[in-house]
Amino acid sequence: MRLRQVVLATGIGLIIGYLAKQQVTHYQKVTPEKALKQAKDTFKKNGPISGSWIYMKPEEVEKNGLLYNAYRGGVTRNVDGQNKQYEFYVDVDTGAVVGSVQTA
């Protein structure tokens, strides 16, 4: 009977651990690397890009009256023989590109 209790307790512990892991990974924030990849994929829909960067520390950004916790990054693309730079913000929680603007 003692062995049966140990096996049962181990099984219950494994199930609880698995369910807890699923909940934690479901609410895990987007990493900067994943945010950069998603932003690059979005920009590539309009043509090739030649360079990219992202800050690893999120910033608070206001867009349309809403506050976002977002990563700031940028891409460079060649348009009509000239390099054009674009800056963007990627929401830490969803990975969506919140806004972009052409710079220099």
Image (tube, grey):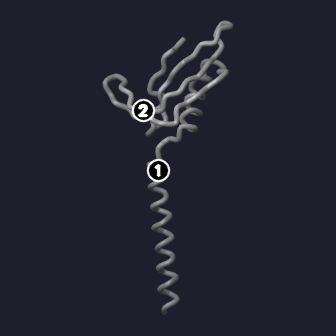
**Residue at point 66% right, 13% down?**
78
Q: Is residue 24 above or below residue 71?
A: below
Labelled disc at residue 59: 2
Q: Which quarter of the picture shows residue 42?
A: top right
* Category of crowding for the residue at label 2, using alpha-carbon neighbours closer than 10 angstroms: few (below 14), some (14–19), many (at least 20): some
Task: Please state if 19 lies on the left or on the right of 74 as rendered.
Answer: left
Q: Which quarter of the picture shows residue 59?
A: top left
**Residue at point 37% right, 24% down?**
63
Q: Is residue 35 above or below residue 99?
A: below
* Category of crowding for the residue at label 1, using alpha-carbon neighbours closer than 10 angstroms: few (below 14), some (14–19), many (at least 20): few
What amino acid is at disc 1? His
Q: Residue 87: x and y, percent?
A: 51, 21
**Tag 1, which secondary structure?**
helix
Task: Please state if 5 lies on the left or on the right of 63 as rendered.
Answer: right
Q: Is residue 54 above or below residue 2?
A: above
Q: Is residue 95 above or below residue 15?
A: above
**What quarter of the picture does the C terminus occupy?**
top right
**Residue at point 34% right, 22% down?**
64
**Tag 2, which secondary structure?**
strand
> Is tag 2's residue or tag 1's residue first in the polypeptide sequence?
1
**Residue at point 48% right, 66% down?**
17
Q: Residue 25: x and y, percent?
A: 49, 52
Report the residue that reaches farthest toward the top: 80
Q: Residue 26: x and y, percent?
A: 47, 50
Instruction: Out of 54 and 17, give the one closest to the viewer.
Output: 54
Question: Mark 2 against mark 1, which lies toward the viewer?
Answer: 2
Q: Which residue is mark 1?
A: 26
Labelled disc at residue 1: none
Instruction: Out of 5 and 83, give the one closest to the viewer.
Output: 83
